[in-house]
Image (cartoon, helix red, strand yellow):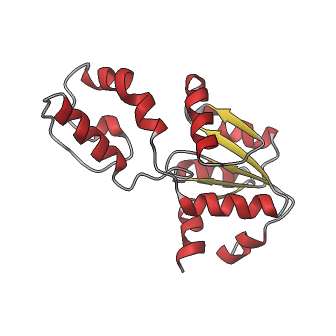
Amino acid sequence: MDRFNLLKLHNCNVGFDIDYTISKDDGYYKNYIDNYLKRNNLNYKYIKKTKYIDKMYEWPKGEYMNFKQNEFIHLISSLPLNKNTKKFIQHLKNNNCNIYIITGRSENKRNITENWLKKHNINYEKIIFGDKYKLKACKELQIDYFFDDNSNVVDLLNRNHIKSYLVDEIERLYYE
């Protein structure tokens, strides 16, 4: 589908992932972890830019789990919003589309996730948790279109006849 035809969607069911799709990194994770390390007088070697924060630094055994237990709720509650995705979601809502959030986050992140979505005025019909269930959820919700940052998820859904796009397609709508 031509990217500008995405703006013509109406009366359909559209699914979105959260992390790196509705939210945006823009260096947020690295800055957060750098501040955490500084606050705690820790000096772990930065390895590479990646969306997997456990792979960004050389965490000593057990230290990443300690970080996750003590900081993860604050980390994800402060994630920046992808304003283009929000704009696109609002556009779809105005065109009578149903919005579904299908995230890989675990169910125990429900409250913090729902609060983050509310804080950013993201309107949706339903939210589904658990990465293993994206295909199943899309089928059950009769999703017509899905947006994610993970090319493996996009490929899987496309192979199963659910029109799926990388979040980059949303970015192109508003940048070109």
Residue 70, position in %: x, y?
Answer: 35, 22
In this picture, residue 49 sits left or right of residue 51: left
Identify the residue shown where x is 71% and y is 69%: 6
In this picture, residue 20 sits left or right of residue 37: right
Q: Quadrant location of the N terminus?
A: bottom right
Residue 163, position in %: x, y?
Answer: 71, 58
In this picture, residue 26 sits left or right of residue 12: left
Identify the residue shown where x is 40% and y is 36%: 75
Residue 88, position in %: x, y?
Answer: 66, 63
11 over 70 or under it: above or below: below
Q: In this rendered view, identify the residue nearer to me: 140 or 12.
A: 12
Residue 52, position in %: x, y?
Answer: 37, 41
Identify the residue shown where x is 64% and y is 63%: 87
Q: Quadrant location of the C terminus?
A: bottom right
Q: State which quadrant residue 62 falls in.
A: top left
Most distant residue in the bottom direction: 176
